[in-house]
């Protein structure tokens, strides 16, 4: 299990380009020699991509919720009118 964690950390360092240049070269050589490591790296890359997309979706939902509150609730009427006037002049 410990080897797996170390390997995951090495893959992460490689993907984020946080490893030293020498370590980067050694890892790239391992990628050529160990097809399994290359596959693990691709899966880790895919996991990062999915997390990033999920984060974007979450942020978008939060922004839409704030927008909904600001432009529909009575207590924010003066703010929404100011914003609408600001963009109406363009």
Image (spheres, helix red, strand yellow):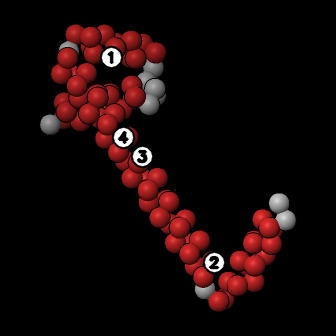
Rate crowding at label 4 as few (under 14), some (14 to 19) or many (20 or more) other CA atoms within 10 Å. Answer: some
Q: Nearer the viewer, residue 29 or 84?
A: 84
Q: Which mark is residue 27?
A: 1
The reply, left or right, for residue 89 in relation to residue 39 is right
The extreme bottom residue here reads 74
Judged from the image, the secondary structure of the residue bearing numbered disc 4 is helix
Disc 1/disc 4 C-alpha distance (Å): 19 Å
Q: Nearer the viewer, residue 89 or 78?
A: 89
Q: Earlier in the sequence, mark 1 or mark 2?
A: 1
Which residue is depicted at the point 20% across and 17% down?
35
Number of disc labels: 4
Q: Which residue is mark 4?
A: 48
The reply to whether dot 1 and dot 4 touch (C-beta < 8 Å) is no
Image location of residue 48, percent across then percent down:
36, 40
Q: Nearer the viewer, residue 83 or 37?
A: 83
Q: Which residue is mark 2?
A: 71
Quarter of the picture containing the N terminus is: top left
Judged from the image, the secondary structure of the residue bearing numbered disc 3 is helix
Q: Which residue is mark 3?
A: 52
């Amino acid at each position: 299990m410990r080897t797996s964690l170390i390997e995951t950390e090495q893959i992460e360092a490689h993907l984020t380009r946080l490893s030293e240049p020498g370590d980067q070269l050694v890892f790239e050589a391992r990628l050529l020699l160990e097809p399994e490591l290359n596959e693990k790296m691709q899966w880790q890359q895919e996991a990062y991509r999915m997390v990033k997309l999920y984060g974007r979706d979450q942020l978008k939902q939060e922004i839409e919720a704030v927008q909904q509150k600001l432009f529909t609730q009575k207590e924010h009427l003066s703010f929404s009118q100011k914003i609408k006037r600001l963009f109406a002049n363009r």
